[in-house]
């Protein structure tokens, strides 16, 4: 039976070997059985450029390359942590980079995919920050700084981001539902799949559905499965 997997918000880093182990287990034992795998952002906890190197990064690249070489298509939408993943990473792994919003035919269902941060428009400060860091000229300049400098900048941004989250309400950091419905309508989608908020759930709105991918934790991998016979469900971790 044909099937497609969707994952996001793994936040892989050298400091979380349990998450990396879950990812490699998924790539070796589940992903090869799919025809498509979509990674909807925040595969890494942060990304400072395609020239960044580490044992974990090389392992992740090899795992994706092995999957795509086997014939399984792999797609990636940038998250708010790894929006600097570029053409170099894509060429080395064989995955395909997608725009912020991508509409696909999911076994007959017009389905819209995104990371999810663009739907959180009530978080005005974050949206202002996002607009700045997505400027091509700024990214061009940043990627030409020494790796050590980029790493320090990224760590400062992460620290500040954690502080800001502590001061924000839960509602502000969630999607704006009227805006989300407008986006679905713009793309004529009956199904929306996204991550970012870490609130794994399947929401039904009349004849439309919004599915939120969860974040990965040491004892849980949030993996959404869609099959050609119309089933859509989250796999349960052992």
Image: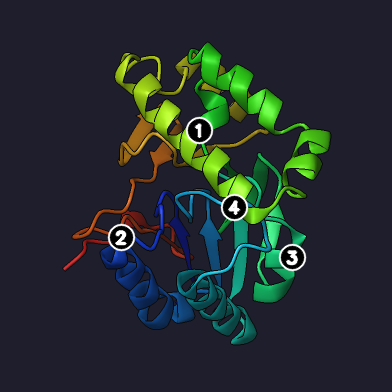
Residue nearest the observer in this picture, 141 or 185: 141
In the picture shown, does residue 94 fall above or below 231? below
Which of the two discs, 4 and 3, sits closer to the camera?
A: 4
Q: Is residue 82 visible in this depiction of the protein?
A: no
In the picture shown, does residue 157 fall above or below 94? above
How far is disc 4 from disc 2 in space, using C-alphas?
A: 21 Å
Q: Residue at 43% across / 28% down in the picture?
A: 161
* x, y percent for residue 61: 56, 74
Which of the two discs, 2 and 1, sits closer to the camera?
A: 1
How far is disc 2 from disc 1 in space, using C-alphas?
A: 19 Å
Report if the CB atoms under discs 4 and 1 are less than 8 Å apart: no
Q: How many marks?
A: 4
In the rendering, which numbered label is found on residue 197? none
Secondary structure found at label 3? helix
How far is disc 1 from disc 3 in space, using C-alphas?
A: 24 Å
Secondary structure found at label 2? loop
Which of the two discs, 1 and 3, sits closer to the camera?
A: 1
Q: Which residue is mark 4?
A: 148
Q: Which residue is mark 3?
A: 88
Q: Earlier in the sequence, mark 1 or mark 3?
A: 3
Q: Which residue is mark 1?
A: 157
Q: Which residue is mark 2?
A: 16
In the picture shown, does residue 181 fall above or below 90? above
Q: Earlier in the sequence, mark 2 or mark 1?
A: 2
Residue 169 is left or right of residue 207, and the answer is left
Secondary structure found at label 1? helix
How far is disc 4 from disc 1 in space, using C-alphas?
A: 14 Å
Q: Earlier in the sequence, mark 4 or mark 3?
A: 3
Secondary structure found at label 4? helix
Q: Is residue 43 visible in this depiction of the protein?
A: yes
Q: Residues within 10 Å of mark 3 (few under 14, many from 20)?
A: few
Q: Residue at 40% across / 82% down in the picture?
A: 28
């Amino acid at each position: 039976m044909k099937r497609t997997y969707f994952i996001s918000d793994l936040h892989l880093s050298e400091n979380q070997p349990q998450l990396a182990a879950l990812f490699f287990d998924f790539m070796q034992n589940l992903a090869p059985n799919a025809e498509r795998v979509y990674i909807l952002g925040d595969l890494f906890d942060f990304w400072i450029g395609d020239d960044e190197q580490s044992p974990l990064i090389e392992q992740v690249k090899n795992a994706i390359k092995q999957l795509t070489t086997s014939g399984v298509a792999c797609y990636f939408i940038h998250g708010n942590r790894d929006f600097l993943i570029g053409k170099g990473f894509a060429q080395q792994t064989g995955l395909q980079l997608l725009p912020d919003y991508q509409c696909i035919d999911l076994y007959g269902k017009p389905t819209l995919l995104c990371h999810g941060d663009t739907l959180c428009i009530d978080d005005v400060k974050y949206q202002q920050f996002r607009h700045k860091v997505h400027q091509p000229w700024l990214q061009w300049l940043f990627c030409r700084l020494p790796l050590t400098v980029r790493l320090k900048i990224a760590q400062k941004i992460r620290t500040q981001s954690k502080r800001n989250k502590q001061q924000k309400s839960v509602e502000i950091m969630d999607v704006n539902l009227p805006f989300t419905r407008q986006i679905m309508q713009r793309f004529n989608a009956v199904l929306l799949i996204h991550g970012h908020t870490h609130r794994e759930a399947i929401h039904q709105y009349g004849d439309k559905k919004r599915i939120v991918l969860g974040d990965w934790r040491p004892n849980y991998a949030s993996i959404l499965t869609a099959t050609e016979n119309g089933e859509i469900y989250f796999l349960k971790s052992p």
